[in-house]
Image: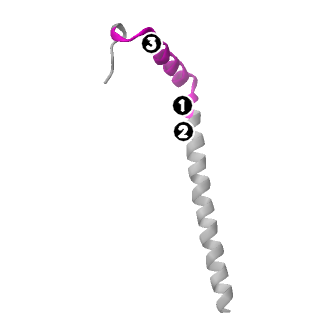
Amino acid sequence: MVKSANSMTEEELRQELQKIRAERSGVGRRRVKQAKSKRIEGVNKERRRKDEAQKEESAEWV
């Protein structure tokens, strides 16, 4: 629920202003990029683990 500026306390107004400034400066975008890169790293690690496991299994049967 969004409050109007008149009903917010001074501290809430400061926090809201800080949040808006951070959004405009791109802080949120950086966090999203970092989260995306970590997600991609995780996917790549999982893929490597699967590939290595398959290679080990195929090597045992040879």
How many numbered circles does the render carry?
Answer: 3
Give the percent coordinates (x, y) of residue 23.
Answer: 52, 24
Q: Which residue is mark 3?
A: 13
Which quarter of the rendering shows the C terminus? Answer: bottom right
Q: Is residue 59 above or below residue 7?
A: below
What is the distance, in whole Å, between disc 1 and disc 2 at their CAs? 6 Å
**Which three-letter amino acid code belongs to the residue tagged 1?**
Gly
Instruction: Say left or right for 60 vs 46.
Output: right
Question: Label 1's element?
Answer: helix
- Quarter of the image for residue 35 reads top right
Residue under the point 63% across and 76% down: 53
Residue under the point 67% across and 88% down: 60
Image mark for residue 42:
none
- Quarter of the image for residue 26 reads top right
Q: Which residue is mark 1?
A: 28
Q: Which residue is mark 2?
A: 32
Label pair 1/2, CB-CB below 8 angstroms: yes
Q: Which residues are magenta?
A: 7-29
Between residues 7 and 54, which one lies in front from this camera angle?
7
Give the percent coordinates (x, y) of residue 18.
Answer: 52, 18
Question: Label 2's element?
Answer: helix
Q: Is residue 49 above or below residue 27?
A: below
